[in-house]
Image (cartoon, grey):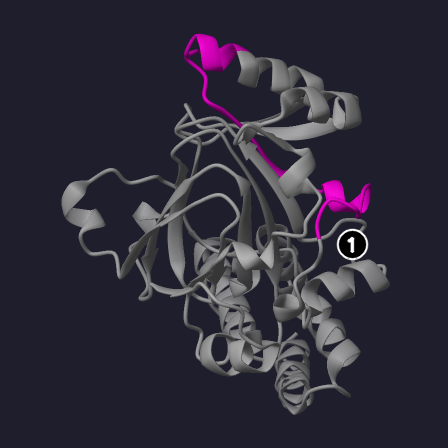
Amino acid sequence: MERLEEEVSPEAFWKDYIQKLKPCLIGNWLTDSWSSRKDWVKEERIDVDFLMEKYGHLQVPVTNCSTEDFKCSSMLFREYLRYLQERRRNASEDILYCKDWHLALIDKTFYEWPEFFRKDWLNEYCLKTDFSDSDYRFVYIGVKDTKTPLHRDVLASHSWSSNVVGKKLWHFWKDPLPERLLGTYSTDGEFLKTADLVVVQNSGETIFVPSGWFHQVKNLEDTISINHNWINEASIQNTWKHLLEELKAVEEELEYLHSGMEDAEWTETCQKILKAQTSMDFEDFRKFLQFFEDRAQIAKDLLIEVQKSISASKSEE
């Protein structure tokens, strides 16, 4: 993986990495000014005392990486930090990962949104419309050996991930992988050899994950990262392709019900399931494109295609 140890311009980054959907690792210079790099870290480790005092009263989502289905729950952040402290002394059976925490909805001061990643249609749309009361900006805090299973990012979006402190191991695959492998964290040596890219990300460094790339991630030590999922004109075609593929899979799985339903009910049911699985149905995506059609020709062109698909499904009813 290419490493950008020296600062480059946003224009060059767009041309060389975002447009080409090319992963890269960005050096510490991107995050050096963040307050979290100073306030959340003490002696190169997570500063539990600072985080406990500032955020301990907040409820956070937690994933159990010891279970096959990565079972999710929630707890007070102070409880998670106590677990982290105890695990430093005595390894417990459960490996708990505080992840997908929408802290930026509450506190915007702990990091700066990098200029490279500001053309972020997904989070702009979430924050400026009534599409969602949430967003796609996350904080991850995990003890050693917490992991994220093999996946492609939501809505075939890009993502970026910056380590505030700690170390992560990433495996990347560019081409589609068997469905049976998704949602699992592989330790199979032969399979891992097929990865297109393998990289260790250290404190302060940022990984750019382009739309469409499959990846799995493991924390090699107690680690905090800040992450965004995001969509722009370089990825929007992949998002539409993803929605079409997901809808086809839903329709194939539910085909046995079709004969007993009116076509309108069938279409509506499939779209509801599509939204539950991806966060958008076709009508949501149409509104999303409409929001950005004056900024990018690709959004305007794709909007026409999506509208035709919606009209075609209604004409079949």
Residue 270 seen: no
| Quadrant (top left, top right, bottom left, bottom right) of the N terminus | bottom left
The amino acid on which the numbered mark 1 sits, given as a three-letter code, is Ser
Q: Residue furthest left?
A: 190
Task: Give the number of callouts.
Answer: 1
Q: Quadrant of the C terminus?
A: bottom right
Say if 270 sits above or below 304 in the image.
Answer: above
Frontmost residue, 189 versus 270 = 189
Q: Nearer the viewer, residue 209 or 247?
A: 209
Figure check: 26 above or below 179: below
Q: Which residue is mark 1?
A: 132
Which of the 4 quarters of the picture holds residue 53? top right
For mark 1, does the 10 Å Cα neighbourhood hold few (<14), some (14 to 19), or many (20 or more) residues?
few
Say if 185 sits above or below 87 in the image: below
Q: Residue at x 68, y 83 (%)?
A: 307
| Residue 40, horizontal then vertical, whole percent | 65, 33
Per the image, is 3 magenta? no
Q: Quadrant of residue 265?
A: bottom right
Q: Position of residue 124 (x, y in %)?
A: 76, 65
Q: Which residues are magenta?
A: 86-111
Residue at 75% x, 46% y: name it.
104
Left or right, residue 95 beside residue 157: left
Q: Is residue 92 magenta?
A: yes
Q: Position of residue 105 (x, y in %)?
A: 80, 46
Residue 304 visible to an observer of this rendering: yes
- In the image, taking residue 107 as reference, residue 238 lies left or right, namely left
**Residue 11 x/y as whole percent:** 59, 82
Q: Secondary structure at mark 1?
A: loop
